[in-house]
Amino acid sequence: MTVPSADELLFVALGGAGEIGMNLNLYGHAGKWLMLDLGIAFGDDSMPGVEVIMSDPTFIEERRKDLIGIVLTHAHEDHLGAVADLWPRLKAPVYATPFAASVLRRKLTQAGLLDDVRLTEIPLRGKFSLGPFDLEMITMTHSILEPNALAIRTKCGTIFHTGDWKIDAEPLIGDLTDEAMLKRIGDEGVLAMVCDSTNVFVEGEAGSEAMVRANLKKLVKGRKGRIAVTCFASNLARVESIALAAVAAGRHPVLSGPALLRMIEAAQECGYLLDFPECISPQDGAYLPRDKVLFICTGSQGEMRASMAKIANDEHRDIVLEEGDTAIFSSRVIPGNERSVGRLQNALMARGVEVITDREADIHVSGHPARDELVRVYQWVRPRIALPVHGEVRHMVEHAALASACQVPETIVAPNGSLVRLAPGPAEIIDHVPVGRLARDGDGLVPLDGASLRERRKLLWNGAAAATLVIDGRGRAVAPPKVSLRGIEDEDGALAQAIVAGLHEMLADLGPSERSDDGRIEEASRQAVRRVVRARLGKKPLTDVHIVRI
């Protein structure tokens, strides 16, 4: 389906449907495409050298003349973090409310794109039109400033796209979820609700930031020694709560980590956090008595370059935690980060630091809706179609079942690449489009399943072997083969000797015509090296062979 017709409304996710992160949603109508969000996810231990991954936008890149805009729902990395990387391939205007625009400008400046990207600020609750789409921003609550849902009105019907959200009666910063607006949209009639599925397995409600603020004050007030607290830098209500807890306990708050400073700067630029408690520098904090300082740190997910990891590994130039001190994790572990967070917490505990997480104290609430909140919004909006996104397939399937129990007439589970026709007629998957993943590798982007990263993974798990053969014009060895092993155990050199013997045997077995063919010798040599290593170690190393003829 190259060009959506005037009487149909299409949806396809290139990221964020079947996974959590990398959100990239597309709506097609009347010959045009509209993109909602363009985010990243973070690499894990299976992706050596890769910190950031994102959706491959090739499908929409090939149709970019029909891409009328990129609308960002909010400022979380999994919703706007890929704009600076992928905008040069899309070159579409970008639309965001003030806080997301402020965060994005800093990223574009760093990428040298600020003057190239046409970025339009949309006021909270703003209305605007892009081609055949009439859009209205709807205020929600979440774990970041200015989260927005969108009402997308077309002549085929209205889409309610939730973005990330929850219902928080006391979000501390920002406005409440616009319940009246949601009910009004429901009264107008909603064709489809495209909705966050993250916490569909969680009973009840997500909980309020106000509760976390009260509990952090109690927890901090009762501690002795230094305290370091880590949370998501984007959760500015939480950051403010930690700073207020420090002041209430007679401690000086210290901000440690550039991401924290950037987020607070962006918030204050938009008129938030203007009464944020006065902080001192990490250098000054290092000289205070242990019971008079509290460090607010980046690194709740175990990021190796963040402040908390540097502290745990005794690599921070100013901050030290030792026996009798406390590290508080006011966050949850994002799926996939369990090992990195575990390593971080083990390193802290090995130093005698007490570690407190949301398992030991009520110091975190999610930014995503639990089941009772989902039910409530379905009752308000009353869509004809439920289309779950922002979750793994198991979340989406469970979400569809919940929507059916809420008497939504149609539900559809559409993982990444599923091209869904929402109108006319019943919702159905009519095609599948190519999807893929790109990895930020240094300053460039490479396919996550490409040859370079495949070889890197193979090198990580199996090591590498290289052999150089010096032969004459008739393919006979004129010097012993040279063998180099990396990441392969061979302290006594026996494995290298066995490989050399295998290469001699391989050359002896080749016929005259084969010996004149360098390509054939290279392939036979690779097979010989792998055969020896596999027989002795059970590994299949990355193998490279060089032929030198003299």
Image (cartoon, rainbow, N blue to C red):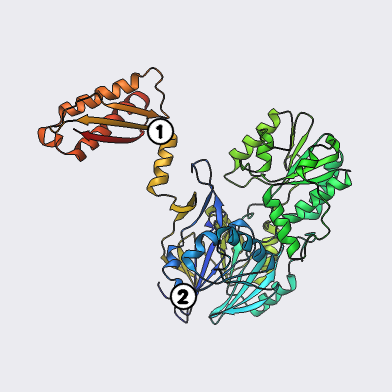
Q: Amino acid at mark 2?
A: Asp
Point out which mark residue 462 bears.
1
Q: Quadrant of the N terminus?
A: bottom left
Judged left or right of residue 43, residue 350 is right
Q: Where is residue 509 shown, x and y percent of the image?
A: 15, 28
The secondary structure type at the circle numbered 2 is helix
Residue at the outermost front position: 550
Residue 324 against residue 335 in the figure, above or below = above
Residue sitting nearer the eye, 228 or 475: 475
Mark 2–mark 1 Cα distance, whole angstroms, equals 46 Å
Image quadrant assignment for residue 234 = bottom right
- Disc nearer the start of the sequence (2/1): 2
What residue type is disc 1 on? Asn
Q: Residues within 10 Å of mark 2 (few under 14, many from 20)?
A: some
Mark 1, residues whose alpha carbon is within 10 Å: few (<14), some, or many (≥20)? some
Going 84% across and 50% down the picture, which residue do you hit? 244
Where does label 2 land, which residue?
66
Question: In the depicted view, which residue is nearer to us: 337 or 93?
Answer: 93
Q: Is residue 120 above or below residue 201?
A: below
Left or right position of 281 against 36: right
Residue furthest top in the image: 492
Q: Residue furthest left?
A: 512
Quadrant that contains the C terminus: top left
- Residue 487: horizontal and vertical position, in percent? 43, 30
Q: In the rendering, at what x and y percent does residue 237 appear?
A: 76, 55
